[in-house]
Amino acid sequence: MIAALAALAAIAAPGPPSPPLPPSPAAAASPVISAALTDATVQVKSDFRGARIVLYGAVFDAAARPSDVVILVRGPEQPVRLSRKQQVAGLWLNSRPVVFRGAPGFYRAASNRPLGDIATFGTLRRLGAGIDHLTINAPAEQRVETRYGVKDVVVSRLGGDYFVWRRAVVRLKEKAGLYHEDDGGVRFVDRGLFRAEIALPTGAPTGVYRVDILLFQNGRAVSRRTRTLTVEKVGIERALYVWAHQGPWSYGLAAMAFALGAGWAASTAFRRE
Amino acid sequence: MDIYLPIAEVSVNAPLIVALGAVVGFISGMFGIGGGFLMTPMLVFLGIPAPVAVSSMANHVAASSMSSVMAYSRSRAVDLRMGGVLAAGGVVGAFAGVEFFRWLRLLGQADLVVSVSYLLFLSVIGGLMLIESLGAILRRRRGEPKPPRRDRRPIWLYGLPLKMRFPRSRLYISVIPPLMLGAFVGVLSAIMGVGGGFILVPAMVYVLRMPASMVVGTSLLQIIVTASLTGVLQAGRNQTVDILLAALLILGGIIGAQFGARASSRFRAEELRAILALIVLIVGLRMGLGLFLAPEEPFVLLSGASG
């Protein structure tokens, strides 16, 4: 236990912010989980090609009960607009678009063994643990009505197709490397000490990410830590992005002036040759 | 050498983008077209979000057209007055087109209209141009004389009011047809995200009956005006212009355009038209193919959550 604590302190020391002090083992009747990220901020610069963040943590449990660790990383929410190709008179056309809300721009679930073995369906659903348990829905397609005398039943206009649509959202996000579920993503490196890696693709949205580290014992979440991870543009990338969004007209005029100037300059340069 | 684009929010291979800009710039300088109909699909294929590709491309089109129009104007192959009339129509058309496109997006049918316009306009124009130019080439090979034009003075060109002299093109025609043509191209440029040169060039030859030597330079002038307006409007309204992406494309484009403008003088006008027709036809059919083939992935993510 002490060894694990010392190891954690040694590893987590350079990482901001200061790692939380776990309660002294003697008083620990209930188990506690603790964790820290090697980097709390990811800087997006011109050479950005994704990032890898290492998460270290430890389980403090005097009774040494069997423990499972689940790590959930959620990026800022991004509404998803999805359309389905339908064949109309021999042509493949887009259907009316459906807007899904509640979909995080980045999601990663990592655990030391399959989520289904760690906790029950209901528990996982309540915690939003696992891609299947994300609350992604299409509010614009929903109606609240009374059915069979039951009030306030939420009915989706998509009907049974809703699940096909939802699976498509997940499939497309997985393809872009934005959603990922990893059964072996958390590795216990020593007694009570674990390690996980969070891989961010280039297309990862900027913003504040929420990292939940959950300790499961006997199918129940007994302890939780929350860390935040900030992905932000820096330097020239940030300056251009801010300019494009805060002074769009001056940005557009400047970009066009640059384009026309470059064209003129090239033409002049070639004539002199 | 990868570089991260701040607005597109993707990482791209910089030399590849510069090379793409150069190739499209070469074609642009050679045929007097913006090259947007080639560039947009290619950028999307490289993983750049479609709205960013369309908007940033406007800057590239403006730059490479600027670069080659200077080369043409030095050889006195630009009809400034005709270009001005076309551009005036184009400005009106571009504003109308942007509004029309918004309305289509609200209906969720923007993609359909874009694909159908590509298929329809590119294949029809490509096909017609190919037939005409191949005919011209064959006639010249056989040493036959040009067939006489049946109607030298079509009523809709000469009978309409508001006549204007275009001394460079040796025309004295009503300004209504060029104004309408400019407006039509402006609408298309907003919808298809192109400069519209591939429509303008043949229309100037076959409809306005301008001398072939004036067509390329003059169409480039109109494209500069339309593309500049579109680029600024896109940046101002949608914030989708990626200046870094545009700069990479421009770097290749302005150089390519210079070589293209020089290379064009080595070919005969009808040969140039035949090559352009083939390129236009292939792109049009390729874009339209998606309408007929069963998609592998039946769902598509649309960009922008609102509207």
Image: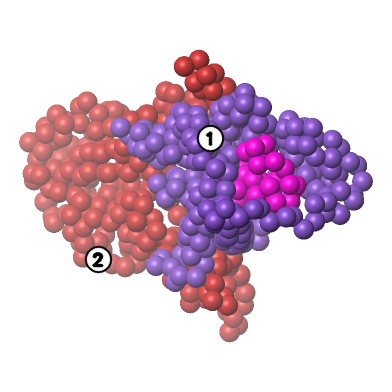
Chain colours: A red, B purple
Chain letter, disc 1 residue: B
Asked which secondary structure carries label 2, the reply is helix
The magenta span reads: B188-216
Name the quadrant containing residue B1: top left
Q: Is residue A18 visible?
A: yes
B297 lies above or below B248 = below
Q: As shown in the figure, which amino acid type bears the numbered disc 2?
A: Gly
The residue singled out by tag 1 in the image is B265
Residue at the outermost front position: B143
Residue under pointer 2: A116
Judge whether residue A227 can be spotted in this image: no
Q: Secondary structure at mark 1?
A: loop
Decide whether residue B192 is among the magenta residues.
yes
- Measured in 3D between alpha carbons, the distance from the residue under mark 2 to the one under mark 1, in whole angstroms, is 70 Å
Outermost residue, top side: A272
* A95 lies above or below B72: below
Q: Main secondary structure of the magenta part?
A: helix
